[in-house]
Amino acid sequence: MPEEFARLSDAHPIVMNSESARALGWELANARDSISPGLRERLEFGLSCSEAELNNAYAAFVRSQRTFPSVLEALDVLLTPSAPGEAPLGLDWTGDPAFNYIWTSLHVPCVTVPAGVGRNGLPLGVQIVGREGDDRAVLAWAQWVAVAISE
């Protein structure tokens, strides 16, 4: 991946938490104590971001969105791990989003396919990632990968 994609790791939380704080403005103003501490912390981070920080984060998204088609130029889809390791145990944490936020930032379709289990017996997965608007192809490739893994 081009080096500029590394900027998405800083840009994504700014955009996600700022937009979430705006969307949940009523809840923050009227029911703050009903919001879980973890979510409240992320929303407060979003509120603390300046307009300049948010605009810079959006600009990082746009630069990467414009560059991504060249990454897939000679490929049908991209196959990546779904996460850095197996799924976490329990429901306290959904896992490390390091291999997911980039696709959200790029507005491209991705599908996770089960790919066995890790050392602790918890699921592993792979992701099939495609071009913006190419959802059907991503789903078709995901089905092909699922069959190939199961054989």
Image (cartoon, rainbow, N blue to C red):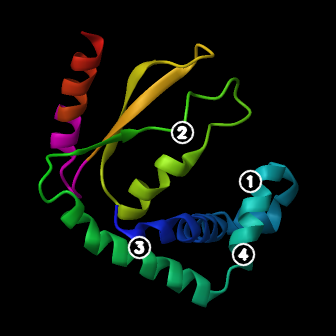
Residue depth check, mark 4 versus mark 2: number of the one nearer the observer: 2
- 80 falls in the magenta region: no
Q: Residue at position x 54%, y 65% from top?
A: 12
Q: Residue furthest bottom?
A: 52
Task: Please tell me in which quadrant of the rendered image residue 133 appears.
Answer: bottom left
Q: Nearer the viewer, residue 80 or 23?
A: 80
Residues at badges 4 and 3 in contact (C-beta under 8 Å)?
no
Which residue was labeled with disc 1?
A: 39
The N terminus sits in image quarter:
bottom left
- Of callouts 1 and 3, which one flags the residue occurring earlier in the amino acid sequence? 3
Give the residue type at disc 3. Answer: Glu
Give the residue type at disc 4. Answer: Leu
Please indicate whether residue 134 sits to the left or right of residue 59 in the image: left
- 135 falls in the magenta region: yes
- The residues tagged by marks 4 and 2 sit, at their Cα atoms, a distance apart of 29 Å
Q: Residue at position x 68%, y 71% from top?
A: 46
Point out residue 72 in the picture as x, y percentages from the top left corner.
Answer: 19, 57
- Of callouts 4 and 1, which one flags the residue occurring earlier in the amino acid sequence? 1
Task: Please tell me in which quadrant of the rendered image residue 143 appears.
Answer: top left
| Viewer can see residue 35 | no
Range shown magenta:
130-140
- The residues tagged by marks 1 and 3 sit, at their Cα atoms, a distance apart of 29 Å
The mark tally for this picture is: 4
Relative vertical location of residue 85 with respect to residue 5 in this rendering, above or below: above
- Of callouts 4 and 3, which one flags the residue occurring earlier in the amino acid sequence? 3
Q: Residue at position x 48%, y 66% from top?
A: 6
Q: Secondary structure at mark 2?
A: loop
Please indicate whether residue 82 sits to the left or right of residue 139 in the image: right
Q: Which mark is residue 47?
A: 4
Q: Secondary structure at mark 3?
A: helix
Which residue was labeled with disc 3?
A: 4
Give the residue type at disc 1. Answer: Leu
